Image: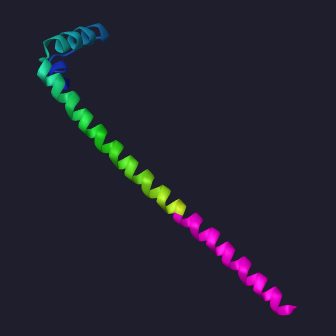
Amino acid sequence: MQQCVYRTKNCDICDLQKCLTQTWVDFEQNVIEAAIDQWCDRLRSCVCMLVADTLNTCRKIILYLYYVVHQNIFTTCRNMLALQALY
C-alpha cells in the first residue's frame, strides 16, 4: 500500500487522503485477506510465547515458594530439636 500511495507526489493532506482512499478501493480482497492471515499468525505466535513464558515464570515462583516453605519447616524443626537438647 505504501508503494502505491507514494508513487505520486502529494502536495497536502487532502491529496494524501484522496490517494489513500483510492488505493484502498483498488486493493484486491485477496491481498487484504492474506495480510490479515499473516497478522493473525504472527499474533498467535506472540500469544503462545507469552503463555509459555508466563507458565515458566509461575513454575519458578511455585518452586521457590516450595523451597522457602520447606526451608522454614526444616529450620523450625532444627531449632525445636536444639531447644529439646538443652532441656
**Image color mode:** rainbow
Q: Residue at x 13, y 13 (%)?
A: 26
Question: In this image, 15 relative to 76: left or right?
Answer: left
Q: Residue at x 35, y 49 (%)?
A: 49
Please determine whether, in this image, residue 47 is positioned above or below residue 33.
below
Residue 4 picture location, percent across and down:
15, 20
Q: Main secondary structure of the magenta part?
A: helix
Q: Residue at x 70, y 79 (%)?
A: 75
Question: In this image, 53 relative to 45: left or right?
Answer: right
Image quadrant containing the N terminus: top left
Residue 22 picture location, percent across and down:
18, 10
Q: Quadrant of residue 42?
A: top left
Tell which of 75 and 1 is nearer to you.
75
Question: In this image, 32 relative to 17: left or right?
Answer: left
Q: Residue at x 35, y 42 (%)?
A: 47
Image quadrant containing the C terminus: bottom right
Residue 35 picture location, percent across and down:
19, 29
**The stretch drawn in magenta includes residue 64:** yes
Query: Range of the magenta residues?
Result: 63-87
Tell which of 60 and 13 is nearer to you.
60
**The stretch drawn in magenta includes residue 37:** no
Q: Quadrant of residue 11?
A: top left
Residue 8 picture location, percent across and down:
15, 16
How many numbered dots are placed on residues in this image? 0
